[in-house]
Image: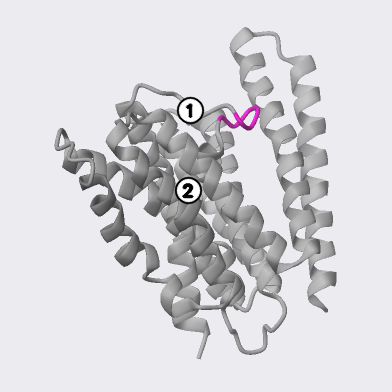
Amino acid sequence: MSAQQKFYWLIAGIVGLLLLASLSGRVLRARLQSESGRATVDNLIARVRAWWVMVGVFCVAFLLGNIATIVMFALISFFTLREFITLTPTRPADHRSLSIAFVVLIPAQYYLIATDWYGLFSIFIPVYGFLLLPTLAVISQDTEQFLERCSKIQWAVMLTIYCISHVPALLLLDIPGYEGQNALLLFYMLLVVQMSDVLQYVFGKLFGKTKLAPVVSPSKTVEGLVGGAASATLLGAAMWWITPFTPLQAAAMALATVTMGFVGGLVLSAVKRSLGAKDWGSMIQGHGGMMDRMDSVSFAAPVFFHLTRYFFTP
């Protein structure tokens, strides 16, 4: 089966699931009487509607080719960095560093992916970016909370540019016997992460009783985590046919991805709580901001990329 045929089968399955979710949401909305129940269903319906849009965007990028996919994730890095910086306080002395992050680091990082320059891609931001940003900041000679300010900008760049760029970087991998199918691997990783988030939400609403981290994320429960993680891992194993993995390997990769995605969501929730915010923004109806959708991906993508590169490339 060709990569394009696999893609069409995969999209058919996703569309079927979205149709089922949309229909189920409408039926539940009509039957529920309680305000809390209706509010939960309304939130679920908004999430499903947003998913229709997001799946459509990813499909278009896939069909247009690798460059379109890379450009799309460069824009995602731009929007997530903007949300991160907007929500966290900055000083005029930081503006030079922030400008470089937006107009230099984002294009440069994604250019390295487009030109298949893995050696520099892997160290450009952690080494050169991290040295450049505080150097630019110190020129303004504003030492008030200098360490905290520089650390915040560096961490924002690490999460929103470097970590997220590992998603399209999957297109770089030279996996024997999997030539021309790397975009499917990208789709696989994103599906596992996002389905884990959705399933944890559903299991938490249906069966959640034990709060997992009530101070950091009041909605997360042990039951939601176990049910969602187990379901997403099984789903990842079932999708082995679009990957270079065996079913068992796909399950292991899915479990690692789900675990890191959960940690990412929890860590970024802690950041939001420390800032007194519920969401990173309001860009995606039903999902909050772009960073609210990419928090899990930012932790999962680098781990998935390097596990794949270490175990499945020469």
Q: Is residue 286 magenta?
A: yes
Q: Nearer the viewer, residue 64 or 142?
A: 142
Q: Is residue 116 magenta?
A: no
The numbered mark, 1 or 2, whose residue comes first in the sequence reads 2
Q: Is residue 16 visible?
A: yes
Main secondary structure found in the magenta portion: loop
Residue interval drawn in magenta:
283-288
Give the residue at x 61% y 72%.
171
Q: Quadrant of the N terminus?
A: bottom right
Give me the C-alpha separation between circle 1 and circle 2. 22 Å
Query: Disc 1 marks which residue?
Result: 279
Query: Disc 2 marks which residue?
Result: 102
In the image, residue 64 sits, relative to residue 275, either above or below, namely: below
In the image, residue 129 sits, relative to residue 263, either above or below, namely: below
The image quarter containing residue 87 is top left
The image quarter containing residue 41 is top right
